[in-house]
Amino acid sequence: MACTEVFKEQVELKEEEEEACTQDGTMDWHGHPAIKAKSGQWTAGTIILLNQGLATLAFFGVGVNLVLFLTRVLGQNNAAAANNVSKWTGTVYIFSLVGAFLSDSYWGRYKTCAIFQVIFVIGLVSLSLSSYIFLIRPRGCGNQEMPCGSHSGLEIALFYLSIYLVALGNGGYQPNIATFGADQFDEDDPKEGQSKVSFFSYFYLALNLGSLFSNTILGYFEDEGMWALGFWVSAASALAALVLFLVGTTRYRHFRPSGNPICRFSQVLVAATKKCSVDMPSDADSFFGVDANDSSVNGNRKILYTNEFKFLDRAAYVSTRDVDDQKRGIYNPWRLCPVTQVEEVKCILRLLPIWLCTIIYSVVFTQMASLFVEQGEAMKVTVLNLRIPPASMSSFDILSVALFIFLYRRVLDPLVGRLRKKDLRGLTELQRMGIGLVIAVLAMVSAGIVECYRLKHANKDCIHCEGSSSLSIFWQVPQYAFIGASEVFMYVGQLEFFNAQTPDGLKSFGSALCMTSISLGNYVSSLLVTMVMKISTEDHMPGWIPGNLNKGHLDRFYFLLAGLTTIDLVVYIACARWYKCIKLEGKPEENDEKGRFKV
């Protein structure tokens, strides 16, 4: 009898666990509170990781060799092609802000991901058709031996329309899929909270493994002039990613969109400005929404008051006029805002200096898709009569990412945690981002040294300078490996940091900040190349990055980037020491750790 009662209790306990809802407020497909056992977790997370891998394969099937397509098929010179690739890549990440805004404000992350993936597929199909029908003429052109013929303005316009549709689709999708994947884990549950932290590492690993196929197999076919085949494979991969994403529809967890953040931010600034002449109290106890239970913004978690950016506190100050309005049942959000709404603005303002410091790193990162490829083209690219496509060297970046994710998660992080004793969580996000900047400096120094030796072994009088140096392309391996190692610390740290430090209603915006730093890095890289070429070509000199790299000084450009990154590191350390983390109600363990986000 006793055994039967124990068995019944165990069954009831199991049923309660199965029916338990998430604590973070996520909803299921039908709009009901999400049940833990029937939604999200690694089932949904794995679908999203596979979706990310396939979408990345599709995107890099275009992006990894785009600089060679522009030079071989469209006949652009090295500097112009590098600039156009930087602008296109930068535009991809600018569009991430569009996707994040629509997701956080109106559509939600699921709908936004689905719509932009459809645009992504349309862009890739259009690119495949335009390349096959109009651009690759005569057939077989576009390899290292046979350039393509001239093209009309309409054909060029159709090409650019296609690749910018790809940019729009991928840009709007990327910041939301990372955040949507993190939504599948309830951070208020200890076990799922740990899975959420791990998800970002696996997400970045899936991104890199997806690009591995593009950088090797697709890169080889495109380098041999089979551009249309490469683009069609990318289109098929993007379509497969979309279908897989839709298959998991009923399993996903969702957060409701929180409304227009621009409106909320404007209300705080206007309300604070209207009360600029008001004498403020010394304490915050009288501010609107400090003690109220309903002072959160659109159902999101309440953010506790902080004493920075005190001018904005005026927006939450309850003046005599506000009291009179409340007695008459009137509430004007353009005169009075709750503390949580004011703290949303403060959170974003605190993030901006850190975000600005990541832009120079992105300048370093973007060289891998442009100047590294052009440098590799001018090296010895044959091994045992097998030609190594220069773009495929980025495979070493991917292998480095995979290796260092494993080393960090399994070796370095536990080791640091044991050494600290009191804090078992290892390196903080900001510390890892600082380490990423240090490794980025090493990457640029390594690339500069390789270029110095490449020039020593180069034929400077060549006409077609592919493979004109006897230095093997495999000497580029260290610079690619350094970039990969730096990504693990910088970009994975960034994803975790911005996701954790943005308010609940701006999570996609946090992921978009990561991508926008890459975007601005591409634009800054393009600007730097333009400035360097303008200055270095005075007095009829060939410049640092001429069409014939053997007559230039690409090494000086790499060393310039190393110097700029070193200066950026110093500024970053100062900003990281100043930064204070977000304070959420109900998370005292995070609120009390004043040094958790310090460097």
Image: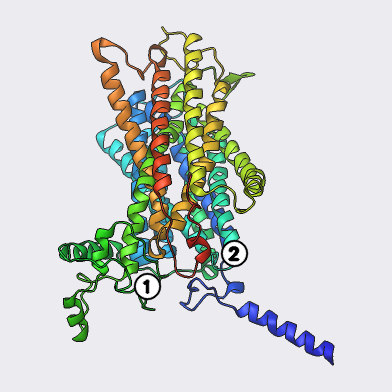
For residue 192, the mark is: 2
- The residue lying furthest to the bottom in this view is 1
The residue under label 1 is 296
Query: Is any part of residue 358 visible from this angle?
Result: no
Depth order, front residue of 260/566: 566
Q: CA distance from mark 2 to mark 1?
A: 24 Å
Give the structural element (helix, strand or loop) at label 1: loop
Residue drawn at 33 percent across, 72 percent down? 285
Depth order, front residue of 420/372: 420
Residue drawn at 45 percent across, 35 percent down? 365
Residue drawn at 20 percent across, 86 percent down? 327
Depth order, front residue of 491/58: 491
Mark 2, mark 1: which one is toward the viewer? Answer: 1
The correct choice, above or below, for 304 with respect to 133 in the image is below
At label 1, the amino acid type is Ser
State the image coordinates of residue 502 (x, y, percent, origin top left): 41, 58
The correct choice, above or below, for 538 with respect to 574 in the image is above
At label 2, the amino acid type is Glu
